[in-house]
Image (cartoon, grey):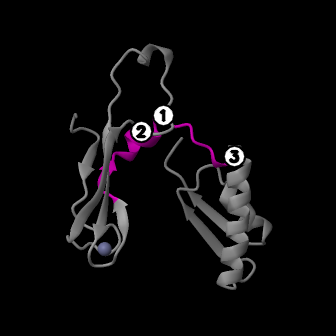
Amino acid sequence: MKQENYFKKDRCRICESNSLEKVLELTPTPPGNNFLSEDQLDKEEQVFPLELDFCNDCNHIQLGHVVDPNFLFQNNYSYVSGTSSVFVNHLKRYADYVVNLFDIETNSLIIDIGSNDGTCLGHFQELGMNVLGVEPSR
Ligand SMILES: [Zn+2]
């Protein structure tokens, strides 16, 4: 496996502890939702480690490696949240749940990191919130 476009994360993404323990290792895998062009079909596709690490200090489970976001999201990344009616409905229920759980006042600011096409934020807007999406893909 080529060691380019990714690195092993040796500190927890939440608490920065170095007490991480590998709990699951799957077969190295090409990036999801990266459709290949016709001229790429007969070429070997780069794969990345697919491992989960458990943080012994804060109990967060996280991916063990970080893939360069320029590689992951700037090529042919094709995932769009709004194309699945099941997911759209889930995000609507999620927005209702979060606003009620935390009793969020109308006109509050909701920020979504990794907002994709804004489907989730659209539901918060319908609930009267101001929204800001941050999305690395084109
Ligand atoms: Zn941690």
Q: Position of residue 49 (x, y in %)?
A: 29, 44
Q: Amino acid at mark 3?
A: Ser
- Work out whether residue 45 or residue 106 is closer to the camera in this orientation and state it: 45
Viewer-side residue, 116 vs 138: 116
Marks 2 and 1: in contact by CB < 8 Å? yes
Residue picked out by circle 3: 84
- In the image, is 7 to the left or to the right of 115? left
Residue 120 is drawn in which quadrant? Answer: bottom right
> Dot 1, crowdedness within 10 Å: few (<14), some or many (≥20)?
some
Using residue 112 as the reference point, say whether residue 58 is left or right of it: left
Distance between the Cα atoms at labels 2 and 3?
20 Å
Q: Is mark 3 within 8 Å of ligand 1?
A: no
Can you give x and y, in whole percent of width and height, for residue 62 in the image? 36, 62
In the picture of the structure, the residue carrying the numbered disc 1 is 34
Mark 1 vs mark 3, CA separation in Å: 18 Å
Q: Amino acid at mark 1?
A: Asn
Residue occupying the point 46% across, 38% down: 74
Residue interval drawn in magenta: 63-81
* Residue 53 appears in the rendering: yes
- Element type at mark 2: loop
Assess whether residue 118 is covered by the magenta stretch. no
Query: Do we see residue 104 in this rendering?
Result: no
Residue shown at 21%/39% (left/top)? 3
